[in-house]
Image (cartoon, rainbow, N blue to C red):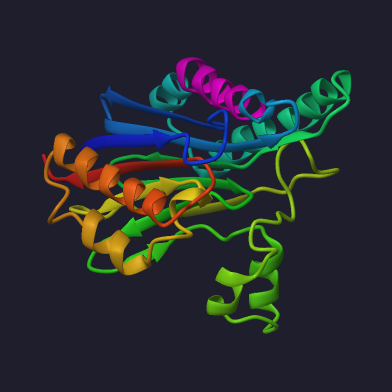
């Protein structure tokens, strides 16, 4: 399996800093190509959201340099990945809380990460940043940990109502601002000639799933420059529709080779 990779991040229309952080790394190994992508959407007073998001990103960077090569050599299963990623999420929940107390503020970050191997994907999720799989349809691979997502699950809101609900960005948990963090973890088969997408919530509120599909399905994501242009077009559409948040999107296209 081969991978084409592109990413776009934008400060947006109203914020003074970009509190989104991301990491994308590709590894060529004896077991084939492997891609790790991580996206964190930070929040917090005193412009500390970017500190929360970048600290978690850095933890995954260190993991990818120190632990991932070992796992690729010795072999691993989903329990190994889940345990080590959970440890990052839980340890940084405490570290970020301790750091924020020094400044008398609150800060935190969402987390969504995906590891793509020749055959499988592994995803961790805390908060409302998302992972998608785009084949001949668009599918959300993660589950939003938000008040409105819980209300939808309980039958108290429709998805259409949730998009207009003032609580749509209220998180049930995030790293650094929750007493306890319980990450979601997902495993699935990697599909050839597909696109795997990570995004912060600022990317998806003002555009439709149909627009995401039209710009990001594999038939139009044929090279990294084209991927960059397509994703930038969606970012600009968000801004034209007055999206106020930071906007970040990562695209990974799979193909045989």
Q: Quadrant where the C terminus lies?
A: top left
Q: How many marks?
A: 0
Q: Is residue 48 magenta?
A: no
Nearest the camera: 31 or 133? Answer: 133
Nearest the camera: 76 or 201? Answer: 201
Which secondary structure dominates the residues rendered in magenta? helix
Q: Quadrant where the N terminus lies?
A: top left
Q: Residue at x 44, y 50 (%)?
A: 203
Q: Is residue 126 above or below residue 140?
A: above
Q: Residue at x 72, y 28 (%)?
A: 92
| Quarter assignment of residue 19 | top right
Q: Position of residue 85 (x, y in %)?
A: 60, 35
Q: Residue at x 31, y 51 (%)?
A: 234
Q: Is residue 204 above or below residue 175?
A: below
Q: Is residue 63 magenta?
A: yes
Q: Position of residue 123 (x, y in %)?
A: 50, 47
Q: Residue at x 32, y 32 (%)?
A: 34
Q: Position of residue 166 (x, y in %)?
A: 68, 65
Q: Residue furthest bottom?
A: 155
**Residue 1 in sight in this render:** no
Nearest the camera: 90 or 58? Answer: 58
| Quarter assignment of residue 99 | top right
| Quarter assignment of residue 100 | top right
Left-right relation of 16 to 224: right
Q: Is residue 202 above or below residue 15?
A: below
Q: Is residue 33 above or below residue 234?
A: above
Nearest the camera: 189 or 144? Answer: 144
**Residue 191 in sight in this render:** yes
**Magenta-highlighted residues:** 52-67
Q: Position of residue 146 (x, y in %)?
A: 67, 60
């Amino acid at each position: 399996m081969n991978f084409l990779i592109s990413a776009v991040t934008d400060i947006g229309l109203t914020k003074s800093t970009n509190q989104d952080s991301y990491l994308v790394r590709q590894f060529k190994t004896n077991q084939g190509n492997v891609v790790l992508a991580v996206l964190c959407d930070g929040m917090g007073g005193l412009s500390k959201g970017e500190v929360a998001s970048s600290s978690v990103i850095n933890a995954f960077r260190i993991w990818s340099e120190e632990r991932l090569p070992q796992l690729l050599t010795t072999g691993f299963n989903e329990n190994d990945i889940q345990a080590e990623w959970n440890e990052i999420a839980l340890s940084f929940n405490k570290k970020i809380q301790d750091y924020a107390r020094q400044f008398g503020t609150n800060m935190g970050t969402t987390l969504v990460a995906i590891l793509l191997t020749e055959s499988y994907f592994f995803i961790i999720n805390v908060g409302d940043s998302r992972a998608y799989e785009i084949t001949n349809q668009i599918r959300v691979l993660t589950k939003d940990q938000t008040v409105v997502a819980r209300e939808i699950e309980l039958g108290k809101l429709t998805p259409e109502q949730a998009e207009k609900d003032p609580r749509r960005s209220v998180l049930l948990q995030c790293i650094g601002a929750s007493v306890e963090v319980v990450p979601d973890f997902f495993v699935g088969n990697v599909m050839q000639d597909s696109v795997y997408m990570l995004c912060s919530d600022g990317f998806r509120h003002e555009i439709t799933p149909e627009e995401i599909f039209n710009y990001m399905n594999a038939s139009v994501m044929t090279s990294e420059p084209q991927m960059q242009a397509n994703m930038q077009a969606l970012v600009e559409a968000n801004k034209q529709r007055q999206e106020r948040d930071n906007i970040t999107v990562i695209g990974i296209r799979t193909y045989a080779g």
